[in-house]
Image: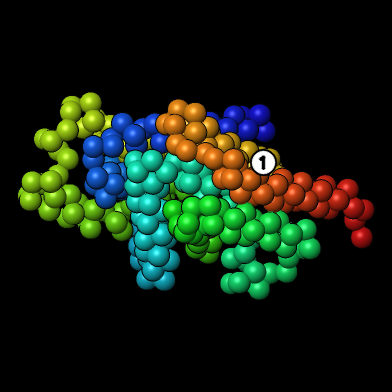
Amino acid sequence: MKRGVLLAVGAYVAWGILPIYWKALQAVPAMQIMCNRMVWSFFFLVLLIGIKKDWTSMRQAVSQPRLLLIYAVAAILLSVNWLVYIWGVNANYVVETSLGYYINPLVSVLLGVIILREKLRSIQWLSIGLAALGVIYLSFDYGSLPWIALVLAFTFASYSFVKKTAPLGSLHSLTLETGIMFAPAVLYLVYAQKHGFGAYGNISTFQTILLVLAGVVTTLPLLMFGSAARTIKLTTLGVLQYISPTIQFVLGVFVFGEPFTPARLVGFAIIWLALVIYSLEGIAVRRRAVLAPAD
C-alpha cells in the first residue's frame, strides 16, 4: 500500500512538473514535440517489452481488428491531448491546462451519464453543475470559452473511457497506441526536416537530447501510475490525482508569471469547491459501502 502511494505521488508530481520540460523545448513547434514524443515513447516501450520478453498480448491484440480499432481511437485522442497540452504550455497557458485536469474527473462522470446512461447521485449533479458554472464564469472573464482546458478534459476523459473497453495492460496498450501513430509521426518529422523547418540541426544539443528523452519522460510516470493503480484504493487515487494540476497551477502563476486576476480566482474557486464536494461525497459513499453489513 505504502509503495503504491509513493508510486502514485511520484507519477502525479512528474506530470505536474512536465511544463518545465516542455518550456525548455519552446523553440520547437508543438506538433514536432508531440511527434517526437510518440516516436521515442514507442522505441522505449518496445525496448521494455523486449527486456520482459512479453510479446504474447501484443500479438493477440494486433490479430483482432476490433481491438486495433479501439486502440486507434485511443491513439488519436491521446495525440490530440498531447498536442493541445504542449501547445498550451508553450503558448503561456499553463494555468488553463491545469484547469483541464482539474475538471477531468467531472467530465469523466458526465461521459458516463451520456454514453453509459449511468445514474448520478444528487451531490454528483451538484458538483457537475458548480463546475459548469465555474467554466461559464471563466468564459465571461476570458471573453471566450477556455477551450484549451475543455479539449484537454474531454480528450483525456474520452481516452480513459475508450481504454476501459480494451483488455491490454498499461505497458502493452501504450505501446500499441504509440505504434499506431508511429508512421504518421515519422513521416511528418521527415517532411519537416526535408523542408527546412525540422528541429534536428536547428536547435541546441541539449534540446535535441530533451527531444529524444521525451519518450522516457512520457512512459515512466505512466508505468508508475499503472503499478500504483493496482495496489491502492480508488479513493486514494481520487484524492492524489489533484497533485498534478495543482503543481501546474502553481508553476503557471508563480514561476511562469501568467496573469491570474481576482475575477479568475473566483472562477477557479467555484471549480475547486465542486471538486471538494465531489471528492468528499465519493469518500463518504465508499465508506458507507464498506461499513454496511452483508446480507
Is 59 left, or right, of 202 in this rendering? right
Q: Is residue 84 left or right of residue 295?
A: left
Of 56 and 231, which appears nearest the observer? Answer: 231
Taking the spot 41% from the left edge, 71% from the top edge, the residue there is: 66
The quadrant in which the N terminus is found is top right
The spot of residue 149 in percent (x, y) is 49, 52
Task: Give the residue displayed 63% in from the left and 33% down from the top.
Answer: 5
Q: Which residue is mark 1?
A: 239
Q: Position of residue 41 (x, y in %)?
A: 32, 43
Tell me if mark 1 has few (under 14), some (14-19) or many (20+) residues whose alpha carbon lies within 10 angstroms of its own.
some
Where residue 111 appears, x then y in whole percent? 59, 65
Q: Nearer the viewer, residue 189 or 135?
A: 135
Q: Amino acid at mark 1?
A: Val
- Relative to 123, say whether 101 is above or below: above
Residue 208 x, y percent position in the rendering = 21, 32
The residue shown at (92%, 60%) is 295
For the question of whether residue 112 can be seen, the reply is: yes
Residue positioned 61% across, 72% down in the render: 114
- In the foreground, 129 or 28: 129
* Disc 1 element: helix
How many numbered marks are there?
1
Q: Is residue 268 at least partly visible in the picture?
A: no
